[in-house]
Amino acid sequence: MDSFSPLIARLLPSDLRPIYAKVSEGVRLDENEAVFLLQHKDINALGTLANIPRERKNGNVATYIRNLYVNYSNHCILSCQFCAFSAKKRDPHAFELSIEQIAAKVKVGLGQGITEVHMVGGLHPTLPAAWYIELLQTLRALDPNLFLKAFTAIEIRHLADRIFKKPLLETLSLLKEAGLGALTGGGAEIFDQGVRDRICRGKETAPEWLEVHEAWHGMGMRSTATMLFGHVETLAQRVEHLRLLRDLHDRTAGFTAFIPFAFVPETTDLAHIPPTTAADELRTLAVSRLYLDNFDHITAYWISFGLPLASLALNYGVDDLHGTIMEEKIFHMAGAKTPQAQSEKAFEKAIREAGRDPVPRDTWYRRLAPSPQAERPAEPQVNP
Ligand code: SF4
């Protein structure tokens, strides 16, 4: 698709013009170009470039989802250095919810109009396979239309290898049959093994993460892809992470969206690492949009960026602001200062202020009608 404009080309810095020509003609960028863009100082020019595929794919629409986060437990057999969420059984901050407690939270969420439950936990050492099946079946029975998005690829491997003790495909089939509707994208971090050894030693490898998503997509199902950036990785390692996702999505077309997270160091073992900057976050979102040409959606995760920056990012390639969430633990235990929930009204306002049109979506990013709770903006007053 050719959207080349000589005027825009003239306004861009000269070193971005060849990339502008490629982007406007829908030609795929390579890894060297993505690294070059991640180093570029002119973030507004990157936003101009990233808005080309953003608007080609999604017009002026920006979406969000009415969802509820549930962390069923933070007991975990691993101790990733970047994680402040996990706990051993006797730690004072350890917790484990019963199925009844989780169902009670979900009932409250359903009363508030949620369409999705997003549920992850640590790699629990002892909860049996039957507990996970019963959990999904119980939530499914509360509302057959409620989308159950749950478990990272890392949890899935843990369940298959240590809890269900069944092959990966069979474990995924059992979970799907019990009501699992989509996998979450967590656990990807940065795929480079050297980086993983420094921030999450002992965690599953990139090929293992990718294999879970490929198997799930092969069952006709969808998932999201993530990246935790802004710690010890180089820009080339960031781009290599994107390349592996783009390659898998070329094979399966199974990812609904890409969701990068900025690392929050404060209470983690990596607290000495300075936090990312707003410029780096906008640059990473814009370059993700430009490089991942086969992904339909780029989400700015407001829990990690804050809603004001996520809203700004709607003009830097982003077309989705994630969800209402209601109760976030993982980033907040690491020191995030953002709120733990957003109202639909807040999303609508943030999206309109960015000049975009807000539309609620479902788990698979299909557009939905706004709920009655969403407050419409007042009609503009016409001065006599
Ligand atoms: S990131 Fe996940 S796997 Fe690693 S320690 Fe935290 S909960 Fe466990």
Image (tube, rainbow, N blue to C red):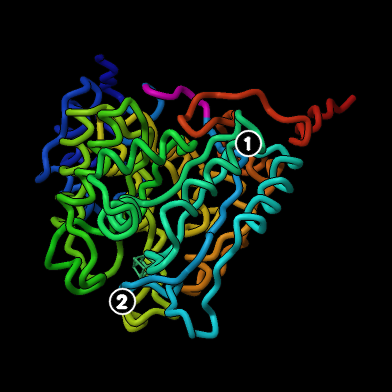
- Give the residues in magenta: 57-61
Give the Cα separation between the discs numbered 2 and 1.
38 Å
* Label 2 Cα neighbours within 10 Å, binned few <14 / some 14-19 / many ≥20: some
Q: Position of residue 212 (x, y in %)?
A: 25, 44
Q: Is residue 58 magenta?
A: yes
Residue name at image x 34 percent, y 36 percent? 173
Q: Is residue 115 magenta?
A: no
Q: Is residue 333 visible?
A: yes
Res 47 seen here: no
Q: Left or right? Give the position of 200 relative to 58.
A: left
In the picture shown, does residue 150 fall above or below 278?
above
* 248 vs 73: above or below: above
Name the amino acid type tagged 1. Ala
Q: Quadrant of the C terminus?
A: top right
Viewer-closest of 35 and 337 = 337
Residue denoted by label 1 = 141
Can you give x and y, in whole percent of width and height, for residue 286 in the image? 33, 43
Q: Point out the residue furthest to the top here.
A: 1
Residue sitting at x 39%, y 71%: 76
* Quarter of the image where ligand 1 sits: bottom left
Residue 378 image label: none
Local packing at callout 1 (Cα closer than 10 Å; few below 14, some 14-19, many 20+) is few
Q: Residue furthest right?
A: 384
Q: Amino acid at mark 2?
A: Gln
Q: Are dots 2 and 1 in contact, CB under 8 Å?
A: no
- Horizontal and vertical percent position of residue 213: 27, 40
Position of the N terminus, as image quadrant, is top left
Which residue lies under the disc numbered 2? 81
Q: Nearer the viewer, residue 313 or 320?
A: 320
Name which of mark 2 and mark 1 comes first in the sequence.
2
